Image (spheres, rainbow, N blue to C red):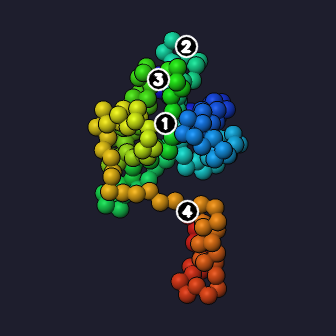
Amino acid sequence: MIRPATPADVPRIHAMIRELADYERALDEARATEEQLRDALFGADPAVFALIAESDADRRETVGFALWFRNFSTWTGTHGIYLEDLYVRPHARGGGHGRALLAELARICVERGYQRFEWSVLDWNAPSIAFYESLGAEAMDEWTVRRLSGEPLQALAVLAQSDENPNRPTSLSI
């Protein structure tokens, strides 16, 4: 069974994020707290959303989740979905939960007129890559993901705040 997450799911989502980070060999990088997740998912202005997969045998057992947000394509002129995390607990894999989570996100895309459903996968994660390919997902091999974080992010932000920056915006709100 797939359903939207509720505030009561936050501890389980947090635990599964940590399980996913451990699987991806990056547990030390998973620093989000339950409070941050609760605010992002259920605060005054949520910009991220989650689905929960529950086992059919015991509808109270959370076996997976998908965490996503809207993106936008200037080429299609429409929003899309970016899947930040998809995780199914090891004992529940092969039970159709991952496919059901992705199918629900695809349904949301189609229902809302979104043109794209995108996500990233680690290049060494052969089981996930094979699963995604079985669904018809295409690799975007010509595209390379770039990320600014930590010191480089801070340094670039300082440039925007500099009085010596002739292109500095006078005000910007999102």
Report the Cα–Cα distance between label 3 and label 4: 33 Å
In the picture of the structure, the residue carrying the numbered disc 2 is 58
Judging by the rendered image, the residue that carries numbered circle 1 is 86
Q: Mark 1 Cα within 10 Å, few/some/many (few <14, many 20+)?
A: many
Q: Nearer the viewer, residue 22 or 69?
A: 22
On the image, which quarter does residue 138 sit in?
top left
CA distance for labels 3 and 1 = 12 Å
Image x and y of residue 83, in percent: 46, 43
| Residue under the point 69% across and 39% down | 34
- Amino acid carrying mark 1 in the image: Leu
Left or right position of 48 against 77: right
Name the residue tied to disc 4: 148
Figure check: 74 above or below 83: below
- Residue that sits furthest to the front in the current view: 124
Amino acid on which the number 4 mark rests in the picture: Leu
Which residue in the protein does label 3 denote? 93
Which mark is drawn over residue 145? none
Q: Residue furthest left?
A: 136
Identify which amino acid the numbered label 3 is placed on: Arg
